[in-house]
Amino acid sequence: MSTTRLSLVNAAKGVGCLVIVIHHLAVYGPMSEVIGAQYPKLIEALVTYGKLAVQMFFVFGGYFVAAQMTPRAVPTAVNAPALIWRRYKRLITPFLFAVTLAALITALVRPWFIHDSLSGAPTIGQLLAHVFLLYDLIGLEALSAGVWYVAIDFQLFALTALFTALCWRMPSGLQRLYPLLITALTAFSLWVLNRDESLEPYAPFFFGYYGLGVLAYWTAHTRLGRLGLAVIALLGVVALWLEFRKAAATATITALLLALADLRGRLEHWGDHPVLNWLGERSYSIFLIHYGICIGINALWSLWFPTGLWINAVGIIVAVGLSLVAGAILYRFVETRNNVLGLNARTGILVAAVALTLVLERSA
């Protein structure tokens, strides 16, 4: 079965990215404060539950990495450095454009938009940390909301590729332990590491969700079969018994539904709608770029419409709509293009935007 176009996953990614955009609009900016003054429970729900969509993306990530590296639940002769480099290029190219846009918009509005949702003025070291996805690991402030996910996703992919390559070099008898090792690592993450919030900047904290995605794939594509559903459920139930966490519950439910739909052959058909497919294909670009757009609209609305429930609700809709448009542009001209970073116009635009940002921040 091809894993490049699974309608149900695509639909979930599309809806998930929309939820994240609305979640960040609830968390950041004065528009949500105006709405929250009259509907506090609505904003509170968006803040509390909207971020749970990210756990769904971790499960999908594990599912696809299993399809790519270990489709039969045994380690394969993967070229870990090549895979890691390819993954890095795929993630970092649109990432740099989106983060730069967020930093530039922040610099443009900082002189007249005073709000704690704005990140600090970037330094050269901070920009380099974003290039290498190290900002959380070395304790630097991220320049855009949600970009922690990109760093964690890359860490998880790299660790899985390296671990798979290492296991492939073991004697054949030990290679058979690979699925048990992945299950054990998933359990250790869910039951122990994921309960220590100080570990959030590191991939092992989230490996439990990733591992559930791996098990979801193996459930439908190996002899594990329906036993996999029981294993996923057991891992999740024990994790929630030890300490109830909404994120762990979301990941467990996502993995169970994903495995069950795959077992029934429904992944390619459920959710097959042009709008959902469009959203799903552009979800990464939308996820990356929406923060800068939301900061800009919040800044303008605070200037033009500092009060008024309905006009600020319209502002939320405008921010969501422009985020979709900006994400579509980023997808078309950056994410789907090869060799974007090089001696070309796109790189020139990126460098110019970085330089302009630094000039604006120094002159502020």
Image (cartoon, rainbow, N blue to C red):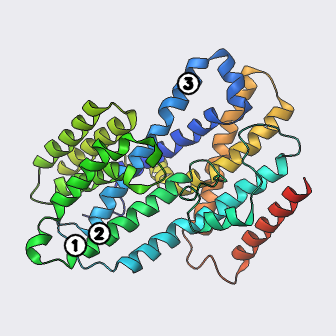
Could you tell me how many numbered marks the image carries? 3
Secondary structure of the residue carrying numbered label 3: helix
Secondary structure of the residue carrying numbered label 2: helix
Question: Residue, x 60% and y 57% (percent of image)?
Answer: 328
When asked about the image quadrant of residue 195, the answer is top left
| Residue neighbourhood size for the residue with mark 1, other residues' Cα within 10 Å, grouped as few (<14), some (14–19), many (≥20) | many
Secondary structure of the residue carrying numbered label 1: helix
236 vs 91: above or below: above
Q: Are marks 1 and 3 in contact (CB under 8 Å)?
A: no
When asked about the image quadrant of residue 298, the answer is top right
Cα–Cα span, label 3 and label 2: 40 Å
Q: What's under tag 3, amino acid-wise?
A: Glu
Q: Are marks 2 and 1 in contact (CB under 8 Å)?
A: yes
x and y percent of residue 316 in the render?
Answer: 67, 34
* Side of 172 relative to 295 (left or right): left
Q: Residue furthest right?
A: 363
* Side of 273 relative to 324 (left or right): left
| Badge 3 or badge 2: first in the primary sequence | 3
Question: Residue, x 59% and y 25% (percent of image)?
Answer: 43
When asked about the image quadrant of residue 134, the answer is bottom right
As drawn, the label of residue 44 is 3
- Please indicate, yes or no, whether residue 2 appears anywhere in the rendered image: no
| Residue neighbourhood size for the residue with mark 3, other residues' Cα within 10 Å, grouped as few (<14), some (14–19), many (≥20) | some
Q: What's under tag 1, amino acid-wise?
A: Cys
Cα–Cα span, label 2 and label 1: 6 Å
Q: Which residue is mark 2?
A: 163
Q: Which residue is mark 1?
A: 167
Cα–Cα span, label 1 and label 3: 45 Å
* Side of 8 relative to 215 (left or right): right
- Please indicate, yes or no, whether residue 354 appears anywhere in the rendered image: yes
Query: Mark 1, mark 3: which one is toward the viewer?
Result: 1
